[in-house]
Amino acid sequence: MSEAGGRGCGSPVPQRAPWSLVAATAAICLVSATSVWTVGAEPMSREEKQKLGNQVLEMFDHAYGNYMEHAYPADELMPLTCRGRVRGQEPSRGDVDDALGKFSLTLIDSLDTLVVLNKTKEFEDAVRKVLRDVNLDNDVVVSVFETNIRVLGGLLGGHSLAIMLKEKGEHMQWYNDELLQMAKQLGYKLLPAFNTTSGLPYPRINLKFGIRKPEARTGTETDTCTACAGTLILEFAALSRFTGATIFEEYARKALDFLWEKRQRSSNLVGVTINIHTGDWVRKDSGVGAGIDSYYEYLLKAYVLLGDDSFLERFNTHYDAIMRYISQPPLLLDVHIHKPMLNARTWMDALLAFFPGLQVLKGDIRPAIETHEMLYQVIKKHNFLPEAFTTDFRVHWAQHPLRPEFAESTYFLYKATGDPYYLEVGKTLIENLNKYARVPCGFAAMKDVRTGSHEDRMDSFFLAEMFKYLYLLFADKEDIIFDIEDYIFTTEAHLLPLWLSTTNQSISKKNTTSEYTELDDSNFDWTCPNTQILFPNDPLYAQSIREPLKNVVDKSCPRGIIRVREESFRSGAKPPLRARDFMATNPEHLEILKKMGVSLIHLKDGRVQLVQHAIQAASSIDAEDGLRFMQEMIELSSQQQKEQQLPPRAVQIVSHPFFGRVVLTAGPAQFGLDLSKHKETRGFVASSKPYNGCSELTNPEAVMGKIALIQRGQCMFAEKARNIQNAGAIGGIVIDDNEGSSSDTAPLFQMAGDGKDTDDIKIPMLFLFSKEGSIILDAIREYEEVEVLLSDKAKDRDPEMENEEQPSSENDSQNQSAEQISSSSQEVDLVDQESSEENSLNSHPESLSPADMDNAASISPSEQTSNPTENHETTNLNGECTDLDNQLQEQSETEEDSNPNVSWGKKVQPIDSILADWNEDIEAFEMMEKDEL
Ligand code: DMJ
């Protein structure tokens, strides 16, 4: 996409007719930031930009080098355990693994990044390796979407730059379209997925056996996500145009045509998932993030690459709908396609961070600046963008797999505005990656942005996209060996040449649905977000848009559902009842509930269930209010249930050579020192003898003053804690005896007490699953003395950690040998397993809604919960912030007094014992995992 622009805005128009029309008719294009403003954000010197560019190169080398050294030819690097992720050899992560096809994914995804980063020699080597080693005929079921954007896109991007280099005459002289041949082979392997009456592809395919044959083990799926079916056109059209085989572009167009036909006609929005056979929307919520994102991206970019007006018309129609319903600057909130004034949820996902970049391509800079600024503030709060965050900017889903979308938008905004602020943003991204994600073997995804703990995962898109955008952000034209403006970026940031627009055009000619008029080139001057036009009188343009949003995140109040009907206010009517205000003891509230079609059912076991039948509501507006009320209930309940769970703790290895870079997610204990209230505990580790810690230790001298490692099993957690405490340990880490267990795949839990008084246990105790535990055990084997920090959150790695003296390797008495550890790890836990797993959301499955209900939520008096730890503020309808804890306290007092039927518990909030029917969130998360990594 620089695509777009780069070429445009007043610069001479190249000899590619459709592209010149693109810029003229679409009001899209970018402006190269030739000069850096001297007002607003401080300008960044050329030296500093170069320094940052070099830092990006070094980081890429660290990531790529470790992949090549420790993982290749595997698909991905596991950066914590320094090895390759081979599908089938690791515990399954579910749909996320569908990106892995045993085709050296990361190498292919990195090909064109190597050229952008000016690593031509490495590129040449990498291409040879792909040609020599990669097999595309494996008996593996892969995601069609991921294989298309990462592998087909990677091969095509590699091919595009290989022929560019060859033409330059210096490198790749031996190259003979081999990558293109592989791409074609892969293209044919994906085609059977399109064998549906709708033309929408099946979500998965077996690379060797295709689909629906018994050996294929796939082909029974009925649904796919909109992005999955609508993100093919760039790669498939490029493949057709490079090779002359028109079938690929035809199939991708057919899928897009079908999606367009199926759009919800009154809102012009599309849902998140669709039935590939009937075309019915399976999930009717609609946003610009997970499940839909790149469908919109590809409509606009298909227009840029192929010059077909119908794509632009479709994009513009959708874009109007997005701006009307979903965009609530600076937020982008999902709505229902049939009721687009109704928000579908109160949280946003990280994938939508690409949208400001797309808005730049569209030429709509203001909302791009606003949303980007909001996202940046969330990042500043949590160091990374959590996978999902609420409208009041709290973490909703704490993972962060090093996604590149925000860097992508930052790059495009810098290109469009030239505002050095965006260079500073890029600098922060670099610092955070190095500070929090860098580990000795690469960069590790964040398991929890709040604790700073890691996941043993480095996705291929991190190399395909993150380094490309960060490098380009700081690069001047002369730092790149080709003209980046001649290419369009795919959704995986692979580069496809714009000259494809005039090559093998037969398909687009055939399918062009609308006419366009060739415009005069002079129109270029007036159709782009050209700084010369937009900003000449106001060089602080971008800053002036950001200014009002300066503290939008810090000063925010929880917004719940924010779209309150304006007419209610205007007419002086009472604002609708909010879930957080609801009191089951208030007769007025019960009356409102009735009006909204919500009934309160008292279950035999004392719980209360809320059910909504929209049809029983007094009016359609009341029905809408009821629907919103139910959603709020579910949302509030799920938030509170999350808060009830003790947050995870962190074990951070601080000694040489880790220096705090390895942070392991740990489970807390319900006894012993509470690390959230006290300073962290730091000490060297020593294994206890016996390793299960179930009797008096025989090696007290070894654990004295140290953090003892104990194996799970054979006695209660509290008993282990007492035994190591008696031996003089200052803390304890219980390591799971279940070989291969990991917090990646198993839910974290709190170690329960033994039912007795545990006040005598003063030391902190943490639990590690086996995989995380073995990282410490391996470290002991290799470095003998290993120092760790037990805390509620990873601490910043300060230079002190690195300056500390290297531990002496002579103190043998404090080391456990590998044999000792592994021999004692055979014992089995019989006792403490059950007592510890207590935080299940599903403890009352019987209270979920009956089949005929439209909406239901259940209230269980038996679900006693602790008060939320955070001090929440809420926005009342006058827009003031009030203290939720106070509100809740007051409320619970009233309830206790007056209602024997709805027992809310002794000190509980009115909504904290509602069982959440949280299907929507869960589905959304699953979809993100499934369809978009
Ligand atoms: C990438 O693989 C692509 O950008 C895709 O469209 C969505 N997200 C991932 C990275 O987050």
Image: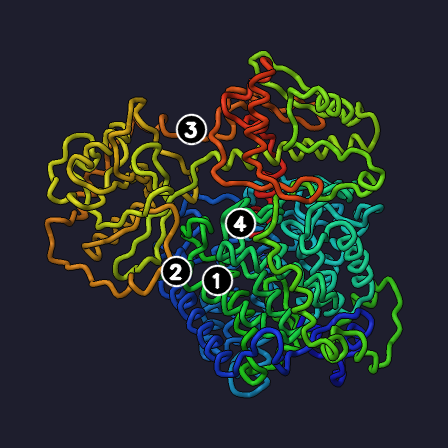
Per the image, the residue denoted by label 2 is: 71
Question: Marks 1 and 3, how far apart in space?
Answer: 39 Å
Does 928 sit above or below residue 547?
above
Q: Is mark 2 on a helix, strand or loop?
A: helix
Residue 586: quadrant of the picture: top right
Q: Could you say which disc has been placed on residue 106 in the image?
A: 1
The residue that label 4 is drawn on is 98
- Few, some or many C-alpha atoms within 10 Å of disc 1 (few <14, some 14-19, many ≥20)? many
Which percent across, then down, holds residue 473?
56, 73
The kind of residue tagged 3 is Glu
Label 4 and label 2: CA atoms lie apart by 18 Å
Discs 2, 1 touching: Cβ within 8 Å: yes
Q: Which of marks 1 and 3 is nearer the N terminus?
A: 1
The verdict on label 3 being within 8 Å of ligand 1 is no
Query: Do labels 3 and 4 touch, CB within 8 Å?
Result: no
Name the secondary structure under disc 3. Answer: loop
Left or right of residue 81: residue 206: right
* Residue sitting at x 36%, y 52%: 663
Q: Which circle marks residue 838 in the picture?
A: 3
Q: Nearer the viewer, residue 334 or 25?
A: 334
